[in-house]
C-alpha cells in the first residue's frame, strides 16, 4: 500500500502538534505507527492522541495502548471522519494539556452511538 494513502498530513502547527486526517479505513496498527513515527523525532517514543470532538490527550505508553486506541478510532471512524493528532511528550508545555480523562471518549456523542467496550479506554493511560 502506498504510504500516502494511509495518512495524510493535514497541518503541522507552530507548537509541533502533528495533525493527521485518516483517508484509508483499512489502515493497520503497524502502518499507522510507521507513518506517525516517520514524522516524529525518533528519539521520543512518548506519543499522545486526541479525537476531533474533544481534543483530549491520551498517552500511549506501550503496544497494548496503541492497539486499544486504534480499535476505538476504527469503530468511531466508521461513522464519521476522525482527526487523530499526535505529538511528542517533550513538546507538551502545560499540565492542562493532559488534564481531561479518557472517560470523555466514552461519553462523547459519537462514542455513545457505538457499542464498543469501555475497558479499551480504561486501559489507556491518562492524566
Image (cartoon, rainbow, N blue to C red):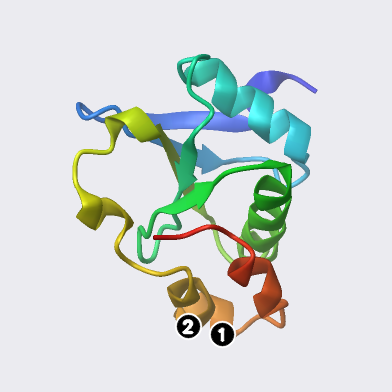
- Where does the image place residue 2, in percent across and percent down from the top left? 74, 19
Q: Nearer the viewer, residue 27 or 71?
A: 71
- Where does the image place residue 93, in percent across and percent down from the top left? 20, 39
Mark 1 highlights which residue?
112
> Can you see residue 79?
no
Q: Residue at x 61, y 40 (%)?
A: 23
Where 6 sits versus 63, above or below? above
Q: Residue at x 54, y 56 (%)?
A: 81
Q: Is residue 76 left or right of residue 127?
A: right
Q: Residue at x 29, y 30 (%)?
A: 91
The quarter in which the C terminus is drawn is bottom left
Mark 2 highlights which residue?
107
Q: Nearer the viewer, residue 123 or 50?
A: 123
Marking on residue 4: none
Q: Quadrant of residue 7?
A: top right
Q: Quadrant of residue 31?
A: top right
Where 91 sits versus 100, above or below? above
Where 119 sits versus 115, above or below? above
**Residue at disc 2, secondary structure:** helix
Q: Earlier in the sequence, mark 1 or mark 2?
A: 2
- Where does the image place residue 34, in percent across and percent down from the top left? 67, 24
Q: Are marks 1 and 2 in contact (CB under 8 Å)?
A: yes
Q: Quadrant of residue 57?
A: bottom left
**Residue at disc 1, secondary structure:** helix
Amino acid at each position: 500500500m502506498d504510504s500516502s494513502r494511509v495518512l495524510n498530513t493535514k497541518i503541522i502547527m507552530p507548537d509541533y502538534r502533528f495533525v493527521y486526517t485518516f483517508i484509508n479505513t483499512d489502515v493497520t496498527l503497524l502502518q499507522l505507527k510507521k507513518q506517525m513515527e516517520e514524522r516524529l523525532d525518533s528519539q521520543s517514543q512518548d506519543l499522545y492522541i486526541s479525537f476531533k470532538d474533544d481534543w483530549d490527550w491520551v498517552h500511549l505508553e506501550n503496544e497494548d495502548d496503541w492497539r486499544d486506541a486504534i480499535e476505538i478510532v476504527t469503530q468511531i471512524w466508521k461513522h464519521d471522519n476522525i482527526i487523530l493528532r499526535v505529538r511528542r511528550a517533550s513538546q507538551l508545555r502545560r499540565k492542562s494539556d493532559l488534564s481531561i480523562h479518557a472517560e470523555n471518549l466514552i461519553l462523547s456523542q459519537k462514542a455513545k452511538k457505538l457499542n464498543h467496550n469501555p475497558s479499551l479506554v480504561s486501559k489507556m493511560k491518562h492524566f
